[in-house]
Image (cartoon, rainbow, N blue to C red):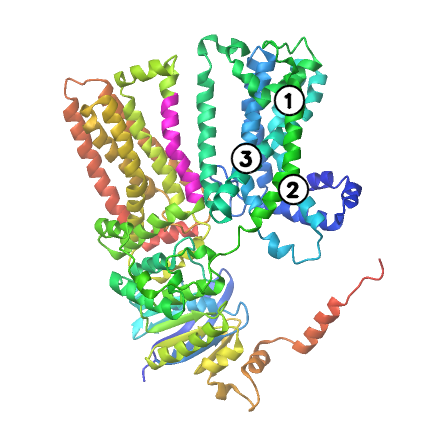
Amino acid sequence: MEPIITIRHLNKKYGEKNVLNDINLDIYPGQIIGYIGPNGAGKSTTVKILCGIIQDYSGDITIAGKDLRGNVLDVKKMIGYVPELAELYDMLTPWEYLNFIGKLYHLPDNVIEERSKRMLDTFGLLGNIYQRMDTFSKGMKQKVLLTSGLLNNPSIVILDEPLSGLDANAVIMVKELLQVLKQEGKTIFYCSHMMDVVEKVSDRIVLINNGRIIANGTIAELRQNDTDSLEQIFSKLTSTGNLTKKADDFASAINYTNTAN
Amino acid sequence: MNKILLKLVMLPSGLWRGMGADTDQLRAILDVRLKMDDRRPPSLGRPNQKKEVKNATWKNMLISVIMGAVYMFPLITVKDAIFGLSIYLGLLMVWLALMLITDFSNILFDTRDKFIIIPRPVNDKTIVLSRLLHVFIYLLRIVLPMSLAGWIVLGIKYGLPSVLVFPFAILLIVFISLFFVNFCYLLLLRFAGPQKFKEIINYFQIAVSVLFFAAVYLIPKAFDPEKGFNITITDHPWIRFLPSYWIAECWHWLDVKSFPIYLPGTEWFAVFAILAPLTCFWVLIKFLAPQFARNLGGLDVAETSEQKIQSAGKVTSGKKQFYHKLANAFNRSDDAKAGFIITWLQTSRSRTFRMRVFPTFAYVPVYFVYLLLSKHESFKDAWIDMPNNPGYIILLYMCAFVMMNALNYLYISEQYKAAWVYYAAPLKTPGGVLSGAFKALWLKYMFPFFAVLSIFTITFWGWATSLDIVLALVNVTLFAVCMVRVGARHFPFSTSEQINQSGYRVIRAFLSMFLAFGLGAAHYALVKRDVLGLNTILKLIFLLLSSGFLWLVWNSYSNTSWAVIKQADDK
């Protein structure tokens, strides 16, 4: 099978700092990729490059057989992106916002209407479709964003912390949704800090640290012994120093009282 | 500056402690509040700080000093000392009330306290006191620099004793303004309920800034210019009912010779100067403030719940919106439709946009009346004489000013980060979105406004002006398109207020303003003077040339490339 995303020697610099260091990755269609790493490891940068938001990088990226540099528009059409710390124009209603997004993806009016109403309905938000989003809770806004990210029926879905703010039922639904999308042959690129979720949903896990891929494989391959959870693997590979000791240090810092004064 | 102010208000810390406040917490809270004030962009005028707002306090204070110096003129020029003082104090009061209404609501509605301070072990008295002291410092920062010129003039003209009365008068002014603003807010809160309150406050702020603008321009005209600086209070006996007159009278009691009273029987009005503010202050503390705090509590409660599910049938029956039809009618590409929709909706929802742009519509008639009056003695004369001059040209071209301001704010949003969608969406070039946004702004704001001005023009100057109206419309539109074309190009609502404005851009803005004046002046000249009886033909040629240019510039603008947008973003 041909990989749907091929990344070769991807490098990205911000000034003097190397954010991404020679990233090489093959992603196959119908897979859920768990893309994990500590804060500042370069996850969001990778994602932004794949979405065509950042365009000055070195290296080659091929998506569905097309070179990303020469075919940014075609690639963008294939991708659905739900960013982290999602920002939207919350003075608009979900209906108005989704219409706006749909137009940017050149969707016909009736498709926008049908898709957005049905998708919001499954999230239980249909009753709020004509209400301004400034009064929405974080979870409600997240649901609108998920809807907007999937509105163009993308074949590659890039999700950056998609579960943040969602209630337990919505989390279960989104996890189920990921499986359904996967069965439809969509590729899902899932970035998160929630190791337990990543461990459960991902077919493959890619761990990035300091701009380098330091682990890449199925959870079974990553396990060095049978009992390791993804969380433990993560900390073994990325933490500097003993975390238990750090926790102790932190706790002893809380207990500090200056008796000299 | 803040450090000094903080030290100052913490001087009577024994007193604060006696009132039950925790002074360490009080200092910490005030310190943070003042720091945040310092970094908040000003609410009046477009900020052009570099990168981040720093030392906003100093800049605001400088503005206050300048405004204060301008207001001080009646103090020097009006011979009747009490009258001059009344005008001066009245202006101070209006300015203070305006500052409070436009700026202070931001502080008032900052409900972050709920999450940051309330969960901590801070007692109620400390919180209340921290708010009061914050208000006090806030006022001090406006009033002191604003009255600076007044201190100097009073000192030089009337000597030290009259200076000593001044702080007392300032205090009274502060009470009255504070009372007035709170009273208005509370009244609104009463009738509107907390949910609609913010919305109404916004319109209220707009109305007040228009009123203020009108007052500054038109009130001086209300006085008889014949008498010039010799105007006396006896021509305007109604002044006796103004609080600023009562306060000014206090100086009379201090120095009868320098401050004679010309309105007989009003000497004892000075009593009101003390009574009224004190009553105001008492009502404020006793009734308004607590009620206000109670009502404000309901402000940020989200009334939306996910359980509020209507029947699906009812929802889907929503008719096709008007703006949707317009978007389809006026734009060919989907990109342009998207730009049109977002602009159409966001311009009437964004508080910033409404606050900064809506008042300018009202400035046009005010300024027009001001120009009319500048040539005539009374409004009646001016009105009768109006159709004899081609003043309508000026009126129509003032649209350019409104459009320029609206275009400036088209790119600004508090939620500018939401603009990531433009970069993630498959847009071939940004030109489509940009042109759609421009069309929406033109159609929603400029065209109706221009239409109203045109009807006014036709009513008073007759149908002969039709060609001028068309030419003016084309020229103003040409100006607007030139402005967006030569200015930094951004997606609608994609930049923050504090965006760095380089000198280069300012120069370009000036150039486009120059263009508007040039077009207007050329047009005016054609109307004013008859050139060999060929005016109609010349106007037609003008129209043809302008339309041609408009077409060229518009084409270039609606084909804006990614490179141009990137360049603007990087600056």
Task: Return the disc, 2 or 1, that comes first in the chain's sequence.
Answer: 2
Task: Determine contact: label 3, label 2, CB under 8 Å.
Answer: no
Report the residue at 19% width, 34% height from top: B545
Q: Amino acid at mark 2?
A: His
Residue linked to disc 1? B272
Q: Quadrant of residue A53?
A: bottom left
Residue linked to disc 3? B99
- Specify the label residue B134 is tagged with: 2
Residue B353: x and y in percent read 42, 43
Q: Range of the magenta residues?
A: B352-370
Task: Return the disc, 3 or 2, that comes first in the chain's sequence.
Answer: 3
Residue B271 in the image: above or below residue B519: above
Q: Is residue B170 magenta?
A: no
Residue A231 in the image: above or below residue B238: below
Closest to the observer: B305 or A207?
B305
Residue B481 seen in this snapshot: yes
Closest to the observer: B411 or A111?
A111
